[in-house]
Image (cartoon, rainbow, N blue to C red):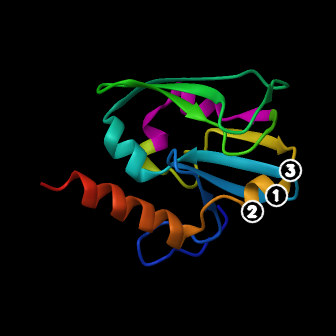
Amino acid sequence: MTAFELAPSGYPSDRRYSSDHVWAKLTGSTVEIGMTPYALEALGQLQSLRFLSVGSHIEQDSPCGEIEANKSVSDLYAPVAGVVSDVNGRTIDTVDLVSGDPFRDGWLVRLQCDSVAEYDGLLDVVGYLELIDEIVSDELP
């Protein structure tokens, strides 16, 4: 396991975040993605996961997988464009890894990124936490 720095919120500061509640971590030209705890809480207990095949090209903000949970079935949206280079088969076999360790063992897909500029355009941890605050504030009576 590699260490990463956590923001006071518990969200890693070495990643970027999409408004679709997907985190992304860039290493070289590879972007590893997963779901944020906020998304996981909204979905409820995960039932099954499906991802595009390795070698598939995906556009930014297009579905690269499907998450079935007890509350709903949702698409997993790619935060950047690229080619699927790896899928985490362990999460398909043991979906509890995703909610149990979403930022490490619970990663979902790796993409060979088409454009680092798309990655740079994602929210940093502060921006993502502000987004969550706005969503929660809008939901209050």
Find out whether the residues at labels 2 and 1 contact each other: C-beta distance under 8 Å. Answer: yes
* Residue topped by disc 2: 120
Nearer to us in this view, 104 or 58: 58
Establish if 75 lies above or below 128. above
Task: Indicate the position of residue 29 as horizontal and vertical percent values.
Answer: 87, 53
For badge 1, the amino acid type reads Ala
Residue assigned mark 3: 115
Which residues lie in the magenta part? Answer: 85-98
State the separation of the CA atoms marked 2 and 1.
Answer: 5 Å
Magenta residue check for 78: no
Q: Element type at marker 1?
A: helix
- Please tell me which residue lies in front, 24 or 77: 77
Q: Which quadrant, please, contains the C terminus?
A: bottom left
Residue 71, image quadrant: top left
Find residue 10 and report its horizontal and vertical position in percent.
Answer: 44, 69
**Amino acid bearing label 2:** Asp
Task: Identify residue type, mark 3.
Answer: Ser
Which residue is drawn at the image coordinates 70% and 22% (left, top)? 52
Dot 3 crowding, Cα within 10 Å, few <14, some 14–19, many 20+: few
Residue 57 in the image: state x and y as whole percent: 82, 27
What kind of element bears circle 3? loop
Mark 1 touches mark 3? (CB < 8 Å): yes
